[in-house]
Amino acid sequence: MRSRAEMLGFTEPEHFVWYARQWERLDPTRPVKKWDTAWRNLRAKAGLPKLRFHDLRHTIITELAEAGVPDHVMESISGHLSRRMLEHYSHVRVEAKREALDARREAKFEEIPSKLRTQ
């Protein structure tokens, strides 16, 4: 949506990303009145008819967790007050967990003096 707004020249601080549209005229200085209609249209144009708005929240929190962002930072970004809610939204993939363990194993291997590794 931000890229689209920039493409249309709607880049002023007072412009809305979800801007009003009436009779095919776009007005970035007014917000869209029906958010659910805007969301449905966006999903349809993106070819993602079943995407729920909260799926975006799940995705960003999962990506932050996989990137190793500390929990307290993710909680601050997402506005969650409890660890339980943070866990509800993060879905760290098995692949990411495996990569983390492999990286740890490599780090341990590097700690072994080279003369002992060849024995």
Image: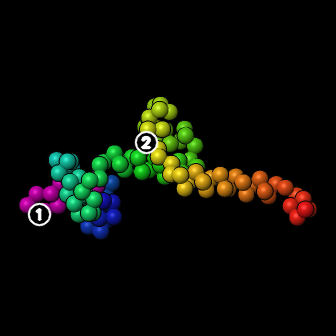
Few, some or many residues within 10 Å of mark 1 (<14, 14–19, 20+) = few
Q: Quadrant of the C terminus?
A: bottom right
Going by the numbered disc 1, the residue's amino acid type is: Glu
Residue placed furthest toward the front: 119
Regarding residue 58, the answer to whether it shows in the image is: yes
Which residue type does callout 2 highlight?
Tyr
Mark found first going from the N terminus, 1 or 2: 1
Applied colour scheme: rainbow
Percent from the top left, x then y, of residue 21? 15, 57
Query: Which residue is labeled 2 in the image?
Result: 89
Q: Judging from the image, what secondary structure is the residue with disc 1 in?
A: loop
Q: Which residue is mark 1?
A: 24
The picture places residue 102, in percent across and down from the top left corner, at 66, 56
Q: Which secondary structure lies at badge 2?
A: helix
Q: Is residue 44 magenta?
A: no
- 101 vs 86, left or right, is right
The quadrant of the picture occupied by the N terminus is: bottom left
Magenta span: 16-26
Give the CA separation, mark 1 to mark 2: 37 Å
Point 47% across, 32% down: residue:
84
Which residue is nearer to you in this view: 21 or 106?
106
Can residue 15 be seen by looking at this rendering? no
